[in-house]
Amino acid sequence: LKYPGSSGISLSGALVMALPSSSGFCVKDDSRMAEQSKVEVCESPTGGGCCLRAKCDVTSGETLLVEPPCFMTDHYDERAVVDFFTLPAARQDLILGSFFCPMDSDNTALIRSRVTGTAADSARAVQFETIMNFNCFDCTPVLADGSGIDDQYEDRVAIYTVASKANHSCEPNASWYTRDVLGTRVVRSIAAIRKGDEVCISYLKNSDLLLPTRERRQKLQSHAEFFCECSLCSSGVDRARVFPCTLSFCPGARRALLHGGASECDACAKVFVEASFSEMFGEEAALCDNLDRIDRALKVSGGHDGDISAEILALRTIHPLHHTTRRVGRLQYDLHIRLHQKADAARALEIIASSHGPRCSMSNAPENAFDLEFLGDGFRRAGDFGRAEEMYDRAWREQAVRHELLHPYVACCMRKLASVRLRLPAAETNELLALGTLVVLRGLRDRRSNGVVGHVGQLQDGLYTVHLGAGSVPVPVSNVSSALLAKAPLILVHGQPVLVHGLTSEAGQALNGRIGTVEAFGQGRVVVQGVRRGLGVADLAAENIVVVDALEVASMQGASCPASRDEGVDTDSETDEDDDEDEEL
């Protein structure tokens, strides 16, 4: 799964935003103060530290805080202490006095055992390392194309005067990301929050939020030295361990209870006897053991252990919403792809998709958005563009809640969504296009024709005559969408999906018909992201860019997205373009 980073200036050693302002932020100058803040630092009601609370009512998908780092380093090891000691004493004191620092922790004892130097320096080094262990964030920025992290920044970490005060919840109402190479922290609401309510993030990795309660608590105890009592962990019900109702006709589910047994069925309310618990928990334990053993074998063999292929194919899921379902689906999908078994791979994708159904109780986990994008990639590769559209649409909506609209994750999902819509027929419409209207062909069986730009002619018997550079062709109404050239008076929007056309050079012709997003524009030029695979942006003339409203997502045009359809799509045809897409995916 991808986890983007960003290209940009190289920052070595420590980056420190100095002296505090009256608002409590550590800033270098006024221009680097928090751009906005809908949170405030308060004393934690449970004691032992601080917390963040909302200063006003907020809805899901709002930016709560934008904050520069107080201290940032590219060394998440002992070298961070060296960076720290290069700071003026006043700044060191500021950092040492501003953060949660449990000097009696097990982690601190380990730090003391290896720190050397004078007594004064050793004390400050131990205190600083303890602060970093309990307060720092990974702050790897995002690649501009949204494809993954930039390895040169993978060890970058930072502490933040405000953001580091946020407490943990396994069911957080906020998430965060790094906006740029300067380490700017953006905190976003992922649920509605009332004024005065605590704002919580997750300290766990994205995938760990999907684990059972006991495993989440073990990870938090190991790394952060606390026993989690968040609303999810203390509910008494483990939402990650879901089992089917034993009544064959009942579609309901039951969930494991933390202190033994299982809940009543959420559909028929049937209560089950202890014997049924033992059987289903035994099946669960056996499946988890098999999955762990297969993962270890694949790790040793580099993912190509043919001896366990039969074991992977023999895996069976417990319930679509059980936490193991994603693992089973991914293992089987990867195996079928390796064996070039297209139909079986598509069935494995449906296993993964079933874990993201409407009854999913862990829908606020950030891993879900990446899963949905992965599913879109898989269905697109399989030629099921209707399902791919559905998954990309859900993926960009989830990413747009967690990130600002121009974030590379969001733009990447928008590009993919627009690209698969180009493969689908348009929604039925009674609109009659005027003669000479600029149009884009879409949803045709000959996929090389999709994305071709022409001008519409006469309409007869449900077919438009479309005039192309090489002649005229009859095209069904549902395979035509109106378009506009990206030049005055049309005003483009940063992040807007656009289509490339009309390039005549050999290299340029390979870009024609591709979907990208606007990175910058002006003086008759448009910089487009996402059309040159692995080669950065493309700087093109505005006359080679068209805007197709029907391919854009709802947020860009203020309308609902069209429904998915599969008519007119030949999923069995193979082209060089499909091979290119497989390489990209």
Image (spheres, rainbow, N blue to C red):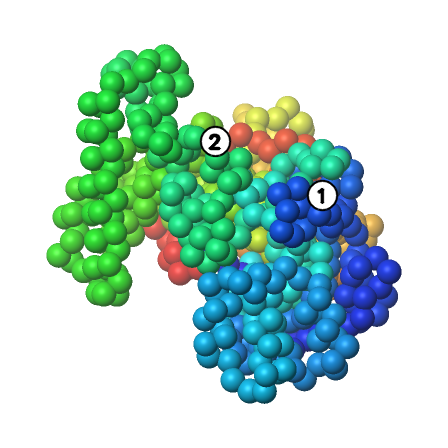
- Is residue 299 left or right of 215 when viewed as pictured? left
How many residues crowd mark 2 within 10 Å: few (<14), some (14–19), many (20+)?
Answer: few
Q: Residue at x 48, y 55 (%)?
A: 225
Rendering coords of residue 398 (x, y %): 57, 42
Secondary structure of the residue carrying tag 2 is: helix
Q: Residue at x 51, y 62 (%)?
A: 105
- Give the answer, above or below, for where 211 lies relative to 3: above
The image quadrant of residue 128 is bottom right
Amino acid carrying label 1: it is: Arg
Query: Is the residue under label 2 in contact with that under label 1 (CB below 8 Å)?
Result: no
- Is residue 221 left or right of 49 when viewed as pictured? left
User: In this figure, which residue is indicated by the disc labeled 2?
Assistant: 235
In this view, the residue in front, 336 or 91, is: 91
Rendering coords of residue 364 (x, y %): 53, 39
Q: Is residue 239 in view from this perspective?
A: yes
- Is residue 321 left or right of 440 when viewed as pictured? left
Q: Is residue 498 in view from this perspective?
A: no
Secondary structure of the residue carrying tag 1 is: strand
Q: Which mark is residue 53?
A: 1
CA gap between label 1 and label 2 equals: 22 Å
